[in-house]
Image: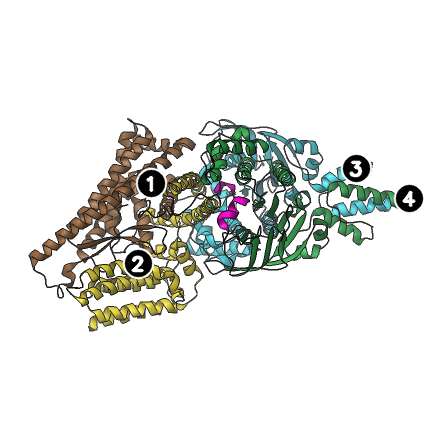
Chain colours: A yellow, B brown, C cyan, D green
């Protein structure tokens, strides 16, 4: 799953963009998304796309392993765009560039920001119950991912997976998922005990340190200002 | 199953803003519906099941262009409102990792929440009358069909021009249905079609969309129903109390 | 009454109707003791610990922890008792190490500055301050164990309960945890109750041992006393430590040997026997 | 070429860019051997095993299993190689013990009657036939381990690979698994490669030992040869077995002692030293 690779990149990365706070990067992403949604100016969108791509490269994100995430929305947009080829070249290009830019901005955000830090900011908008649910989901995902990986390995070694045999795969997947489901439900019971013992109240899983301004925040903030300035200019 | 994959920036802001507002209202309602004691005892299960849904989506089924969602299963095990929250959590994480656009997240949450709510209440109603397997399968099939219809409705309602296609994922293991859509009025300067012509083309594309998505949707619904039923009956065999305790919750809630 | 823990012939019925009994000797822990509960898997060790934390209510029998009934006094006791379960992955809840260790403190409404200070103190003391911003799933097994331990110790509980603290750790990590537990015990007088199925660790960590098998507390004593009953150990499916086996075998040959706890003791005794044999003749 | 396994200076890069190297000595296993790979957590043991199964493709280096490249010959080799992972909970998939053991057979298209026969045979041989209709979830750790082992052995593989087979088991279960592995090795000539961080088990189960530390294969030999190098063991963060420590300490005092592998050996040597001291004077 990409989530694991993305998480690792965000965790071990050390670029200037990585060091900026989640809040500043969320601001940057939001600005880009707004520009993508509102603007109809191809030059501005192209400039924004070039900027986000350059930042992605500067942040040390291996483009090759994530290009499918970029191309994925672009592919649909482009097929749509080309179906309207008769009407307008500009319209087609707009659709393509818009989808690419939005996807790049999101990937830049999540490959350089640890997900808990993003949740830490979202927590301000979300009810405590949902914020906690997000964090627990994130924790559980990685515990379960390891287990699922073992199951899949066991399946492969015992001949339980073949790309072309649907019924075989379905049977194997159902077996593995069933066992994994029971494991995870039982784990959740034990987690419940832990929560009770350690005194759980909604909203306390994340500490208060969601934002501390640093000089590194200048990067995303300046980046966002440049894009905004461009938007005003054209 | 019913999951819109619309790239960002190609749908009119008014629609995704409506989607977000609807989502906010639904989530507020959901949080209010969950009692305080239920929170402490159920939140680990909520987290674990959301993670489980995320994982199940990534199980390669071979070349079938669909993946499991397990929304109804989550609703059965969590109750309707925590199920809605699970839907939100899963969709937010998916949107963050670039799976479907972030702008259509609100709409996606609404569609999938309908699956959770309908699935749960149908299951609860049928559970007393028929065998567990039949109750689960029926609830899943009906809920998914309804959410598929809802999605088609939303798509039609937004009057967006659509192009549906079947697309293998880049990694070649999983594939799923995708929508690429755009908003004609957005680029009105470039589009010089007559009103009538435009309406006509929207009709054909919606028809084409329905014709493409319904068969795939049906395959997805059948697979999902099988998976949810197998999983529920597996729990019933190994740890019946995990579902039984949900029954008590239901009785208390109703 | 100055016992930290007393458990008297416990009976518990789980929701799925399995019954677990724990009878035989009373389970008594005095302040400042390091108690090891030894028994094979399924002997009732974990059930015993769950009752000490107040998570389970016994059907029969008496449980007293720090002078109170742990079920009734749950909310007061949980501040005075730290618990570390066997599976640390399910125990670490915070998204970062810092958040996790601060969890209980935030719950009890400590001030932010106080929390900052207390978390820093325990992390430094345990030598894991550098991990504070790490995400738990990137830690090694030993590091996770230490984080869970930090979360339990941050309030300086009077009693620390650990289920299989050494399971799955490699020798180096085991040694570190043993060192930390010894330190907490010396410096804060923390009473420690832990379970294990590894008898070889006993001499390094415990000063009081209970042997449990099939719901019976069979034996209690300090390590030397317990090792003097290899037949009880075998009955409980536990193998006596190697040195104990060796020395009992030699003692049966008529050599004047006591049961040694450590390597050093064993070496000195053997040297003495050999020297005295020399001088005797 | 009649080596079962040969691994030459392996380098692997995981998707997350962590690099694991395994150089130093070659890792060679001959048919019928019982090989123990010893090293602390994170030394590269599990990576080595994953390469033997063909699940990972090395960036550099050579891996040969039963004369073939395990990545290329994955589909043929997996019928001839049995694998048991560390955490049995994550590899028992079938809803009942019977289903789980029959899983691979069904996938390979054996006939129902044949499957029936083969599963019954292995379950009986391992003394767990009575568990056949049980739901694995409710089995004890030792029983689960046996079920996983049955699933790996049901096709009578030439090579059996086990990652930490004794971790988390109590002494009785350990003994049973050791007995079963010895039996498979004797009766079917099954070659066994296993990892562990518990050095004390070596004398009971291995006839060839590799010591790994930080991606280097430091030492290879039979148990006696390996124990003769306590300094290498310590370098690899492994504690030499107690008897080895005791006897080296005594040998430093000038006593004429060899390194013993088993309790019995140790006892006899000590008795002899004591008696000879007597007679010498």
Element type where label 4 sits in the image: helix
Which residue is more in the foreground, C196 or C137?
Answer: C137
Q: Do badges 3 and 2 share one subunit?
A: no
Q: Quadrant of the N terminus of chain C?
A: top right
The chain ID associated with circle 4 is D
Element type where label 3 sits in the image: helix
Q: Do badges 1 and 4 share one subunit?
A: no
Q: Residue at x 28, y 45 (%)?
A: B1
Q: Which residue is mark 2?
A: A72
Q: Quadrant of residue C279?
A: top right
> Eyeballing the image, is C272 above or below B11?
above
Q: Do badges 2 and 4 share one subunit?
A: no
Residue B117 percent location from the top left of the image = 26, 39
The chain ID associated with circle 1 is B
Are the residues tagged 2 and 1 within 8 Å (C-beta)?
Answer: no
Q: Quadrant of residue C220?
A: top right
Are the residues tagged 1 and 4 within 8 Å (C-beta)?
Answer: no
Q: Which residue is mark 3?
A: C251
Dot 1: within a 10 Å radius of its alpha carbon, few (fewer than 14), some, or many (20 or more) residues?
many
Q: Which of label 2 and label 4 is nearer to you?
A: 2
Q: Quadrant of the C terminus of chain C?
A: top right
Element type where label 1 sits in the image: helix
Element type where label 2 sits in the image: helix
Tag of residue C107: none
Residue D46 percent location from the top left of the image = 55, 51
Q: CA distance from mark 2 to mark 1?
A: 28 Å
Q: How many badges with numbers are in the image?
A: 4
The chain ID associated with circle 2 is A
Q: Which residue is mark 1?
A: B74
Horizontal side of residue B181 vs C152, given as left or right? left
Magenta segment boundaries in residue numbering: D66-95
Horizontal side of residue D106 vs B172, given as left or right? right
């Amino acid at each position: 799953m990409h989530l694991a690779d993305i998480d690792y990149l965000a965790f071990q990365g050390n670029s200037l963009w990585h060091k900026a706070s989640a809040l500043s990067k969320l601001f940057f992403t939001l600005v880009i998304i707004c520009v993508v949604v509102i603007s109809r100016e191809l030059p501005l969108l192209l400039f924004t796309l070039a900027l986000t791509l350059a930042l992605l490269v500067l942040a040390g994100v291996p483009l090759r392993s994530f290009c499918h995430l970029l191309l994925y929305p672009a592919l649909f947009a482009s097929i749509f765009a080309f179906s309207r080829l008769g009407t307008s070249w500009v319209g087609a290009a707009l659709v393509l560039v818009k989808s690419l830019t939005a996807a790049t901005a999101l990937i830049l955000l999540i490959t350089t920001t640890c997900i808990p830090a993003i949740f830490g900011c979202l927590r301000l908008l979300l009810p405590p119950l949902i914020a906690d649910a997000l964090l627990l989901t994130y924790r559980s995902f990685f515990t379960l991912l390891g287990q699922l990986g073992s199951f899949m390995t066991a399946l492969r070694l015992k001949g339980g997976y073949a790309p072309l045999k649907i019924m075989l795969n379905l049977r194997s997947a159902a077996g593995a998922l069933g066992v994994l489901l029971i494991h995870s439900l039982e784990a959740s019971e034990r987690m419940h005990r832990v929560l009770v013992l350690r005194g759980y109240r909604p909203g306390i899983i994340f500490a208060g340190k969601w934002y501390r301004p640093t000089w590194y925040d200048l990067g995303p903030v300046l980046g966002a200002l440049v894009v905004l300035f461009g938007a005003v200019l054209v | 199953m019913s999951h819109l994959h619309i790239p960002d920036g190609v749908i009119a802001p008014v629609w995704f803003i409506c989607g977000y507002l609807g989502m906010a209202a639904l989530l507020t309602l959901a949080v209010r519906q969950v009692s305080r004691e239920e929170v402490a005892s159920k939140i680990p299960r909520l987290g674990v099941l959301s993670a489980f849904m995320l994982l199940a989506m990534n199980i390669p089924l071979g070349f079938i262009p669909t993946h499991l969602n397990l929304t109804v299963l989550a609703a059965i095990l969590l109750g309707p409102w925590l199920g809605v929250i699970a839907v939100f959590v899963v969709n937010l994480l998916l949107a963050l990792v670039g799976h479907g656009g972030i702008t259509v997240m609100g709409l996606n949450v609404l569609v999938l929440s309908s699956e959770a709510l309908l699935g749960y209440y149908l299951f609860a109603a049928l559970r007393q009358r028929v065998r567990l397997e039949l109750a689960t399968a029926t609830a899943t099939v009906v809920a998914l069909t309804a959410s598929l219809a809802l999605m088609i409705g939303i798509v039609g309602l937004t009057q967006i021009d659509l192009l549906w296609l079947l697309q293998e994922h880049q990694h070649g293991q999983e594939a799923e249905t995708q929508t690429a859509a755009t908003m004609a009025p957005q680029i009105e300067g470039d589009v010089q079609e007559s009103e009538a012509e435009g309406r006509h083309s929207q009709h054909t594309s919606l028809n084409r969309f329905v014709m493409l998505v319904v068969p795939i949707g049906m395959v997805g619904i059948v697979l999902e129903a099988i998976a949810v039923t197998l999983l529920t009956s597996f729990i019933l065999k190994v740890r019946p109390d995990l579902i039984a305790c949900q029954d008590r919750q239901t009785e208390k809630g109703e | 009454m100055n016992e930290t823990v007393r458990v008297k012939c416990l009976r518990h019925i789980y929701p799925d109707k399995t019954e677990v009994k724990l009878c035989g000797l009373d389970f008594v822990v005095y302040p400042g003791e390091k108690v090891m509960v030894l028994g094979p898997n399924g002997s009732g060790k974990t059930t015993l610990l769950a009752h000490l934390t107040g998570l389970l209510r016994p059907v029969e029998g008496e449980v007293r922890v720090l002078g109170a009934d742990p079920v009734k006094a749950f909310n007061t006791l949980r501040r005075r008792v730290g618990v570390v379960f066997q599976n640390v992955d399910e125990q670490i809840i915070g998204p970062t190490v810092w958040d996790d260790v601060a969890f209980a403190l935030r719950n009890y409404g400590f001030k932010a500055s106080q929390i900052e200070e207390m978390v820093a103190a325990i992390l430094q003391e345990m030598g894991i301050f550098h991990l504070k911003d790490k995400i738990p799933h990137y830690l090694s097994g030993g590091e996770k164990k230490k984080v869970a331990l930090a979360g339990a110790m941050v309030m300086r509980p009077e009693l620390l309960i650990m289920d299989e603290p050494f399971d799955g750790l490699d020798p180096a990590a085991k040694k570190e945890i043993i060192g930390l537990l010894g330190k907490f015990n010396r410096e804060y007088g923390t009473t420690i109750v832990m379970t294990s199925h590894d008898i070889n660790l006993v001499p390094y960590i415990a000063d009081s041992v209970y042997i449990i098998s099939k719901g019976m507390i069979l034996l209690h004593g300090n390590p030397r006393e317990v090792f003097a009953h290899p037949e009880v150990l075998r009955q409980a499916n536990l193998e006596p430590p190697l040195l104990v086996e060796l020395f009992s075998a030699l003692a049966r040959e008529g050599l004047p040997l006591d049961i040694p706890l450590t390597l050093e003791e064993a070496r000195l005794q053997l040297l003495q026997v050999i020297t005295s044999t020399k001088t005797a003749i």
